Image (cartoon, rainbow, N blue to C red):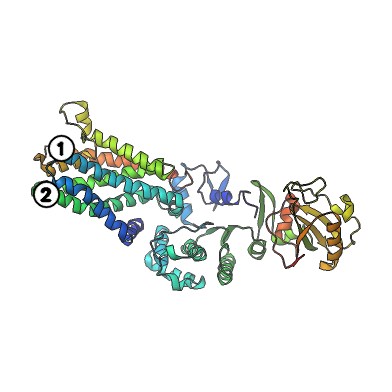
Amino acid sequence: MGPNGSGKSTLLRLVSTELPSRPGSLELFGEAFGPSGRDFRRRRDLRKKVGIVHDTPVHVEDLTGMENGLLFAELYGLSRAEALAVFANLFTSLGLDDALDVPTREYSYGMKKKLLIAEALVHDPALLIMDEPALGLDPPSRAALLRILEERSAKGVCTLAATNEPALAQELATTVVLLHEGEVVAHGSPSELLAKVGSATRIEVHVASSPSGSPTPGDPTAASMTHADLTTSDPAFAGLPADIVSVRRLPGRIVAESRSGSDVLPQLVSAVLAAGLKIERVEIREPDLTDVFTLFTGQALGPARPTSSTGL
Amino acid sequence: MTLPVWRTEWLTALRRRRLLVLNTLIPLAFVAPIALSSAPAVHSAAVFTVLFALFGTFGSSIPLIRDGESGLLRRYVLTGVHPGGLLLERVFANAALDLMELAPAVLVIVVARGSSAGQLAMVVPAMVLGLVAANALGVLTAALAKSVAEGALFSAVSALLLLHWAGTFRTPVPGTWQATLEIWNPFRPLHESLLAAAGAGGLDLDLVLFTIPIGVTLAVLLLITAASRYTIGLGGR
């Protein structure tokens, strides 16, 4: 997990051998890989063992879904009969049965993504690499994808996925790596990482930026956020109830941690107003991996996923 | 051997019916007025050779660049398929498609200029060799280009240079160093056979003499193409 530009896709491209790696920096299935140009045959052998789901699904637009599937299955070295047997289950699971005879040019983004997933799985890869795997999928397809990944995981097969969806990572991952500006800032199981941020409810008060778009002196939503707890550093937040563990600022929002859920919301809202800020909306949610990222980097990972929201 | 890329190229071409018709009619529209006119064979053959060579080179280069830009080549290569094999399949599939699309134009030349059966028999293998070479050249220019515009420029320049080297635009002078080099040029037999078919008389080239150097030339072109595998489809553009 990591924000845009943190190096997630680059990491996936390195692991898939699409990009050259420094000697000794990439080891897969017990084998070390050097820069492209060397190890060519071993790279090709490795690629046969890997399934890749890119963030942008690309197909031969004039071919039907089934023809595309068979094309990539044959490129992976499967016979037509083998591919058809595997695809029968995969296409049904992903809800693509009705579209197999349609040219992929007429597919929606979600359908193309599902076809891409089926193509990446057809040769039963020892390593599955996925970039934003659930992006663009409808809820049933998303559930089907999760089921497929769980089945693979139960068989001990590795999946490496880049995502900005904390729920997906928390639900599926055995290990989460948080990336920021090309560096690993934290890694561990979802429960280990979540333990670092505690269980207090998050109340996010989204506030309007100044008319000029630039932060005013003392503006607690200034982009140059710090880890400073506003309850000790800003008088407007000093008198908040003890159930509010901390109040921190992020670009465009104030984030409070509350031990008593939303009970402290009136006092928090009053404090924000007293600080001279205009409230746009309030979100109340349980902590997730985005909070872990914020803890380590002081920056937001992406838009929060509210469990409830109150417009003010 | 399943040749999935070969099959894909054919399926795609046959489904783009409008493009298929245009690719057949446009060369015909260029060739027919010249073939039916009283233009000298040397000039007619030069036009036909340039048209056929550029048809193969552009038709190979530009779709390959587009597939590189769309990420399709990257997907192919990351299945573990050998990039050289992939490109070879594309070259031969597209050369075969080109031959099919250019066949009516060739037929018009042969009929309009009253070519002999022997001359026709010479044109067919020369067309095959010339189109394979043109498609291989297109693959090379696609590997070097960073955009479709660059690909078109590289294709035009390299094909015209090879055509010049093949003696398409000048009168061959036996015994010169250019004449020695010409027999290595894959477009030479295409030009010579079209020259004969256009009415310049019988072929003065021994089939064996030009077939062997052509084979070597093609092999070198394709080897260089395969060597560019790390660029094509692997984030090089």
> Please, which chain is the residue tagged with disc 1 on?
B
Which residue corresponds to mark 1?
Answer: B42
Which tag, 2 or 1, sits closer to the chain's start? Answer: 1
The x, y position of residue B4, in whole percent, is 35, 58
Where on the picture, by quarter, is residue B197?
top left
Write the residue at 65% across / 46% down: A181
Task: Say which of A12 and B135 sits in front.
Answer: B135
The x, y position of residue A136, in whole percent, is 56, 63
> Please, which chain is the residue tagged with disc 2 on?
B
Q: Residues within 10 Å of mark 2 (few under 14, many from 20)?
A: some
Quarter of the N terminus of chain B within the rendering: bottom left
Write the residue at 30% across / 53% down: B93
Confirm whether residue A207 shows in the render.
yes
Left or right: A178 with respect to A102?
right
Q: How many marks?
A: 2
Tell me the CA gap for discs 2 and 1.
15 Å
Mark 2: amino acid: Ala
Confirm whether residue B143 shows in the render.
no
Task: Say which of B86 and B26 sits in front.
Answer: B26
State whether residue B211 is above or below residue B105: above
Which residue corresponds to mark 2?
Answer: B112
Question: Judging from the image, what secondary structure is the residue with disc 2 in?
Answer: helix
Question: Judging from the image, what secondary structure is the residue with disc 1 in?
Answer: helix
Write the residue at 48% across / 69% down: A90
Write the residue at 40% across / 47% down: B65
Q: Residue furthest right?
A: A239
